[in-house]
Amino acid sequence: MISFEDIDKHSWWYDLYMKYLCAAHNHVYYRNFYIVNKENIPPKGTPTFVIANHQNGMMDAMAILHTMYKDGRQPVFIARGDIFKKDFVARILRFLKILPVYRNRDGGRDDIKKDLAIFNRAAKVLKKGGTLVIFPEAGHQHGHYMSTFKKGFSRIAFAAEEMNDFKLGVQILPLNIHYSNYFNFQSDLMVTCGKPFTYDEFFELYKESPNQAYLALNEKARARVKEMTPDIDIPEYYNEIEALTHIMSEPLLRRKGLRPRFLPNQKDAAMTIIAAIRQLKEENPDDFTMLMEDTRQYTGLLQRMGLHHWVVNRKISWPKLILRIFLMILTLPLFLFGYLNNFLPDFITQRLTHKIKDPMMHSTFQYAIGTLATFPIWYIFLLVVVSLLTHHFWIGLVYITLAGVIGILNTNYKRSLRKLGTTFKALRLRHTEKYRTLCDLNTRIIDKMEGLLY
């Protein structure tokens, strides 16, 4: 049986491994990694309980780890117990400083009884001035919305204070994790750090009624995370509202003179758009319903025609289009070099990843299998082969460096190729009745949204 007693003990092996993980996560897997309001993170040695929204499997944990790890701290995470079922997996998770908590659907009664010991162990991490991380929603979901917070988080928080006669002063640090895309390699990631808060106003309530105190702390904590989150809390129209954030973010940011490709700006724009739509629903339900129906029709037609919203009603600049085609033809040999030298590890990674049924775990497996395993092994193999063939180690080193860099750049080449295909498809369809209907809907939606936003 694996012991978690010294899980918060500082590990030099962990330090060494984290340096590799950080480099792969921040500079390879993600194109840009932003940490906003990092000054809100309490100093190392302060009992800190980190809470965050949960969307993207273990990549959420990696995002928090790389946010908190800069000052050398080694945070302890709490994760659902079902992922600890296999012994070798449990040992890896233990090395990564992850504690298991069992939910009713994860294990039997004996497993759930272990939770009390785990909660006490987690509370001791805080008592010793450590950093503890939990996702209070206790599950991840695909989408920009928040679930309810479970009581495990608040039970640990109060247990830590109770162990210290309510004088420990635990700081709860709310975070928001936001992705430009959940699944794509070389997408952008940002973590927003909220202001830490305490919960001493609930201590007396806890002494009288623990359950009421748990609920009160959950409500306060969820509100702090929610205020940083583009939370689409109208589930029956989730797809339509999310589509409107994509349609209107760039025009809104350009009107404000802000960079539309900068992820923190995109998140702020999405929150502004969601708030405007929520207000419309409250003040004018009929207009809201009409906007949702137009958006549903518009997105459905886009999907059936195989188009994207950015190409609708867009004026084509032929000189720019011809220049783009010329540059893509010119760089085609580089693309082929990168493609051929990265085909095998990419094929293995994608093949193994798509065997995972939960799509919100796909990026986790792409990162773990590809970035940390198949690609490094493949590049070592290439280095040996090219060095032996050329009798020069440095030629092999240059070769794998070029293969890796061009392989990463190929991600942008593929995106440009897809955008080019979409542009030509729009040109072919622009005189059809469906396309004219699409343009009319686009104009109507944008006019309505501009009235709400400006």
Image (spheres, rainbow, N blue to C red):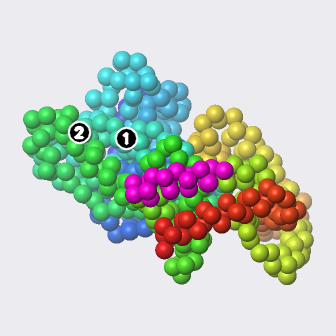
Frontmost residue, 38 versus 141: 141
The residue depicted at 65 percent of the width and 35 percent of the height is 356
Q: Position of residue 250 (x, y in %)?
A: 59, 70
Callout 2 crowding tier (Cα within 10 Å): few <14, some 14–19, many ≥20: many
Q: What residue sits right under mark 2 in the picture?
A: 214
Q: Amino acid at mark 1?
A: Thr
> Vertical placement of 322 versus 65: above or below?
below
Chain-order first, disc 2 or disc 1:
1
Horizontal side, residue 174 vs residue 434: left or right: left
Q: Where are the magenta residues, as a range?
A: 280-297
Name the chief secondary structure element in magenta: helix
Q: Is residue 220 visible?
A: yes
Q: Is residue 296 above or below residue 120?
A: below
Nearer to the camera, 11 or 27? 27
Counting from the top left corner in percent of width and height, residue 275 is at 43, 60
Indicate the quadrant containing the N terminus: top left, top right, bottom left or bottom right: top left
User: In this figure, which residue is indicated by the disc labeled 1?
Assistant: 148
Q: Do we see residue 34 in this rendering?
A: no
Q: Nearer the viewer, mark 2 or mark 1?
A: 1
Q: Residue at x 90, y 60 (%)?
A: 389
- Check disc 2 and give the amino acid type: Tyr
Q: Quadrant of residue 189?
A: bottom right
